[in-house]
Amino acid sequence: MAAVTFEDVSKIYPDGTRAVNDIDLEIEDGEFMVLVGPSGCGKSTALRMVAGLEEISEGVLRIGERVVNHVPPRDRDIAMVFQSYALYPHLSVYENIAFGLKLAKLPKDEIERRVQEAARILDLEAHLKRKPRALSGGQRQRVAMGRAIVRQPQAFLMDEPLSNLDAKLRVQMRAEIARLQNDLGTTTIYVTHDQVEAMTMGDRVAVMRKGELQQVASPQDLYDRPVNLFVGGFIGSPAMNVLEARLERDNGNLVAVAASQRITLEEACISSRPALRSYEGRDVILGIRPEDLEDAAIAGDGAQKSSLTGEVVLREALGSEIMVHFTTDARPAVTDEIQELAKDTGAVGDPMARDNGGATLVGRFGARSRVREGETTQIAVDTRALHFFDPETGLGIYDQTQATKGAAS
């Protein structure tokens, strides 16, 4: 096992395109690091540079203490798991798992020991004599994992290994991979486009955009304190609702005003984001996660003080919860980051925008809610969990330093 370190690493193609730009990242020995971001953000290119499949244009890449910029892939002591499984169809499961060990000319008894151990860990013991065509998608992916495990490498590199599986199997396999990595303790770099995979699997998550790192943090820190609007909009499912707003003082309270919608901020919200006080009388971008919205009729005391008024346009009952889409006269925030995120999901224009200039928001309501489509209803807002971003810089508003930067820009 070994740490993997990027020092100002860039990948520049002959036409001048910077696929990866000045990445500084240290992945600790035994850590499970997830690289996540929209299509074309450079995450797979970064992984391929670690594997030696892409040349490094600038900077230094280390595996352990060794600089590997010019070390051939076969000599880097890493094992890669691909999206396509890359199994040999004419070989049995046993032969597929043992293939790399045979090339390395390990003794037969050592090959046998390693393959049997990998098969036990991955629950493949009953399938060792089968060919890949006789296996399910999940079993094939476990064979690909087994081939990597027996190598006993310094690091595992995984490039969207679950993208070919159906939704139910993906949930099962990501739990298995996370458990396996925890048991083996091998340094792992995992690339995915799926932020749910990133949040549920990684010790830390590195969010990328246009070849650059945006934020590297634990999944919970990314969710609670996104460094900028892009990270806030990318992390979370359904995505964060983002509105144009202005902070005003009303009867001694700080209030976020979005058209006719007025949300009084509790002291807990302000104390965790002291820079908000410096934005009084200024425009901000207000972020509200769907799970921080609730039907005011079931939200309890104080719901009317901090609430939105909206017309329900779609009600999706999911059993344990209800996804409620509702329209308001508040204006959706439209920035480069928001448009990029919308494009990545296949949306045309701003998915929150209404024809009349208002916004359509999504709330994750409790199953007891009785809201109906076509009704105007009150939606309670948990102001302790609100997010605020500077409309010019896109940075999250937290401490006084950020507020000063925002005011100066």
Image (cartoon, rainbow, N blue to C red):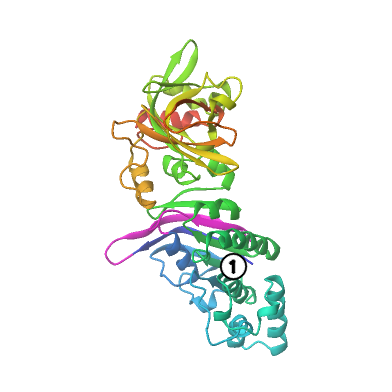
Q: Is residue 40 magenta?
A: yes
Which residue is situated farthest in the left direction here? 15
- Name the quadrant of the C terminus: top left
Residue 45 point in image, percent of width and height: 42, 64
Relative to 216, is 300 on the left or the right?
A: right
Considering only vertical position in the picture, is 111 above or below 321? below
Residue 353 point in image, percent of width and height: 33, 37
Relative to 93, is 73 on the left or the right?
A: left
Q: Which residues are magenta?
A: 13-42
- Name the quadrant of the N terminus: bottom right
Give the SS element for disc 1.
strand
Residue 265 point in image, percent of width and height: 51, 22
Q: Residue at x 65, y 76 (%)?
A: 150
Q: Is residue 255 magenta?
A: no
Q: Which residue is mark 1?
A: 155
Q: Quadrant of residue 20?
A: bottom left
Which residue is situated farthest in the top direction here? 251
Q: Residue at x 33, y 41 (%)?
A: 350
Q: Residue at x 48, y 26 (%)?
A: 275
Could one spot residue 30 in this view of the protein?
A: no
Relative to 189, is 255 on the left or the right?
A: left
Considering only vertical position in the picture, is 11 above or below 141? above
> Which of the pair 111/212 is nearer the observer?
111
Could you tell me the amino acid type at mark 1? Ala
> Which of the pair 70/361 is nearer the observer?
361
